[in-house]
Amino acid sequence: MVKKLTKQQVQRYKRHRLIIGSGIALLGLAFAATMYFTVVPSLQNNARKERIEAIYSSLELDDSYIMQFRDVFGEKKPYDYDQGRSVSSQISYTRGADVDATYADLDKKAAAAGFTLFDKPYNGGQHHYKSTDGEYLRISVDSKSRSDAFQNVYLMGKDIPESLYQLDKNAGPSNVIIKVNLDDNNE
């Protein structure tokens, strides 16, 4: 036998269903917001990181490039002091060749990977490349032996002797830093 509900019980039942339904809807909305603010950026960052990794791979560096440091990431990291500029991913290497030979090798590899040199600073420095997709590659090469000599004197707290300035800027082995930025060339 089925008991008939009173009007008051029916209203209470409807109110409970409305509260439970609203709670479920709010939980669903909270879940969707959480997914939007955590999963979507993560997927975007993963896609960006995969593209950056693909750019490094496209250079097809051989075993003569010995990795020293690696900082590759997918999220866009604007500078605190200038939101229009962002930090680049970077990998540094040491190579058993002089600076000119290393630059020549990297220039060929960058061109083969689809990058065009658009800025070659006076007296060395970073060479800037750009792809047709607006991606940036910055390559720096310097003499490891010369850099080490200057750094060693500095670390020991000594005055830099004039003889260090006479060291060959082209002497091998070479220090190499390759930076990739998908957003800008303003680093």
Image (tube, rainbow, N blue to C red):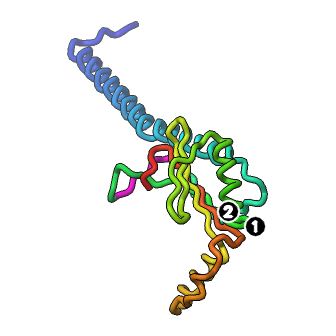
The vertical placement of 67 against 42, above or below, is below
Q: Which mark is residue 96?
A: 1
Residue at 71% from the left image edge and 61% from the top image edge = 101
* Quadrant in which the C terminus is drawn: bottom left
- Could you classify mark 1 by the number of other residues whose Cα lies within 10 Å: few (under 14), some (14-19), or many (20 or more)? some
Name the one closer to the observer, 127 or 1. Answer: 127
Residue at 75% from the left image edge and 67% from the top image edge = 96
Look at mark 2 in the image and give the residue it sits on: 100
Image side of residue 14 versus residue 154, left or right: left
Residue type, label 2: Asp
The vertical placement of 63 against 8, above or below, is below
Q: Is residue 89 visible?
A: no
Residue at the far bottom: name it. Answer: 158
Residue at 68% from the left image edge and 55% from the top image edge = 104
Q: Which mark is residue 169?
A: none
Residue at 35% from the left image edge and 26% from the top image edge = 25
Residue 20's quadrant in the figure? top left
Q: Which residues are magenta?
A: 74-80
- In magenta segment, residue 94: no
